Image: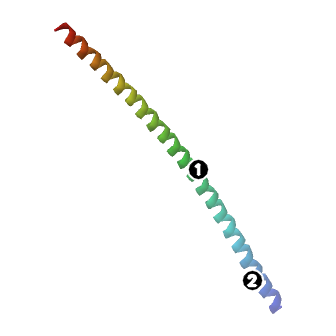
Amino acid sequence: MKIESHIIKQEDILNGKENEIKELQQVISQQKQIFRNHMSDFRIQKQQETYMAQVLDQKHKKASGTRRARSRQCSREK
């Protein structure tokens, strides 16, 4: 009887540990998915920032080219 009760206690402990492991695995899976989502959002944000920087750079180059052309035209008219 004593051995049987000891075995039952050990099985209960094992079952509890297995359940705890399953719960922790679920937490890890959720955290991995959250991390993937954050990384995806971060990549998208970086792409948007790069695109905006390129567009602003192009606009700046066009604007400075337009100013140069105007200043040349003004100096010719004088």
Q: Nearer the viewer, mark 1 or mark 2?
A: 1
> Which of the pair 51/63 is nearer the observer?
63
Vertical arrangement, residue 58 with respect to residue 39, above or below: above
User: Which residue is at a point 44% across and 38% down the rendered structure image?
Assistant: 49
User: Which residue is at a point 69% across and 74% down the rendered structure image?
Assistant: 17
Q: CA distance from mark 1 to mark 2?
A: 41 Å
Q: Position of residue 60 (x, y in %)?
A: 34, 27
Residue at the extreme front of the image, as rendered: 76
Q: Callout 2: helix, strand or loop?
A: helix
Vertical arrangement, residue 50 with respect to residue 61, above or below: below
Q: Name the image quarter holding the N terminus.
A: bottom right
Vertical arrangement, residue 67 with respect to residue 36, above or below: above
Picture colour scheme? rainbow
Q: Position of residue 5 (x, y in %)?
A: 79, 87
User: Which residue is at a point 78% across and 82% down the rendered structure image?
Assistant: 8
Question: Mark 2 — residue?
Answer: 9
Q: Callout 1: helix, strand or loop?
A: helix
Question: Mark 1 — residue?
Answer: 36
Residue at the extreme left of the image, as rendered: 78
> Which of the pair 42/18 is nearer the observer?
42
User: Which residue is at a point 58% across and 57% down the rendered structure image?
Assistant: 31
Residue count near mark 2 (Cα–Cα under 10 Å), binned few <14, some 14–19, many ≥20? few
Q: What amino acid does circle 2 point to?
A: Lys
